[in-house]
Image (cartoon, helix red, strand yellow):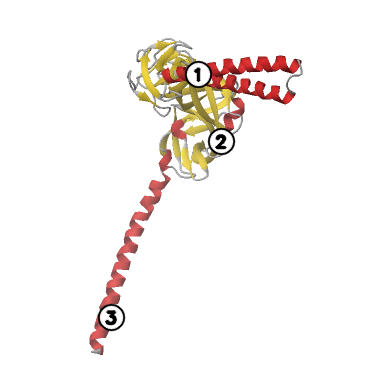
Amino acid sequence: MKIKTLVYSILLIGLVGLISYRITKNSDAKGPKDKEKEKLPITVSGYVIRLQTFDNNLALSGSIEANEQVEIRSEVSGIVTAIYFQEGSKVTKGQLLFKVNDIELKAQLAQSKTRENLASENERRAKLLLQKEAISQEEYDVARADFRTTQAQSQLIQAQIEKTAVRAPFSGTIGLRSISPGTYITPTLLVAKLVNIGLLKITFSIPEKYASQVKKNATISFKVSGSEQSYSAQVYAIEPEIEIATRTLQVRALANNKEGKLFPGTFADVELPLDIIKDAVVIPTEAIIPVQNGKKVFIANKGMAKEVLVETATRTDASILVLSGLKAGDTVLTSGVMSLKEEAPIVVKIK
């Protein structure tokens, strides 16, 4: 049994030794070739940095809203007796939109007016008697208070009657209605929406680092989905504080929509002009490599690739503004950057 075990052990040791020998032999055979391959330079494209003037435009997403918008409702309950607007039509401020039955209220007003007239006459008589000292001041005050109470009651009923005639609070376009003559309406029932789309609000948010560069009355441009036409708007309001959750500043601009081509509720691709930067360092976007601590690029340094951390700002379709890390004359590598390593030999083809 011991001899059998000894034989197996010798065979196992021999097998391990053979495998180790082959691995070592292969490593010795391939090692120099691999090292030679590592020493072969990689051909890459490069871009020589030249200082230039950069029109710093910030691309943002915004939303289009109506300048004024309101839900038309009735303040009183009752039967709708007449509708005076066409769906989707233009209405002017103060125009009568619909009328709610006010017969009962008018009857109450007539009753209240009768009481008011009687109280007025009693107050007049009491005043004459007071002048003749036929009644006390207290009796006159009671008559006067009764007159004022009935007068206020008449005014209250008159106000309720006025509420039965619903008018447009501003000029605009009225939408689809949800009532018909004879509908019993309550304050909770939405009748229609009234919007003013002659002017439109463009609301968007910008990162806090650009907050100081946005000014009132600045002109922005924007486009909407499905159209290549560019529209302009003027900044008229800026939120006074940064939103903590998103670290952004909300801005609102006003655009003219006389032709009616723009609709509230749509998205807008906004281009906000910032400060024009002179002697700016601008590089192709394909040179940027995202890393954990930010962004980096490779530059050519004595025939080898050198890794440089950079701080960037505004980005366009083809280029990006670099705030720090690079200078004029540096050659930034723009191709094969994902496979490059620090101090890798390179041959640069300048674009």
Categorize mark 3 by other alpha carbons within 10 Å: few (<14), some (14-19), many (20+). Answer: few
User: Which residue is depicted at the point 36% across and 59% down?
Assistant: 28
Foreground: 69 or 344? 69
Name the residue tied to disc 1: 111
**Badges 1 and 3: C-beta atoms under 8 Å apart?**
no
- For marks 1 and 3, give the CA distance: 122 Å
Mark 2: secondary structure: loop
Categorize mark 1 by other alpha carbons within 10 Å: few (<14), some (14-19), many (20+). Answer: few
- For marks 3 and 2, give the CA distance: 75 Å
Categorize mark 2 by other alpha carbons within 10 Å: few (<14), some (14-19), many (20+). Answer: some
The kind of residue tagged 2 is Glu
Name the residue tied to disc 2: 243
State which tag comes first along the sequence, 2 or 1.
1
Foreground: 134 or 28? 134
Residue 133 in picture, x, y percent from top left: 76, 18
Foreground: 92 or 29? 92
From this viewpoint, is residue 248 visible? yes
Query: Looking at the image, is mark 3 or mark 2 nearer the viewer?
Result: 2
Residue 311 in picture, x, y percent from top left: 55, 36
Residue 315 in picture, x, y percent from top left: 49, 29
**Badges 3 and 2: C-beta atoms under 8 Å apart?**
no
User: Which residue is depicted at the point 51% across and 36% down?
Assistant: 299
The kind of residue tagged 1 is Gln
Mark 1: secondary structure: helix
Name the residue tied to disc 3: 9
Query: Looking at the image, is mark 2 or mark 1 nearer the viewer?
Result: 1
Q: Quadrant of the C terminus?
A: top left
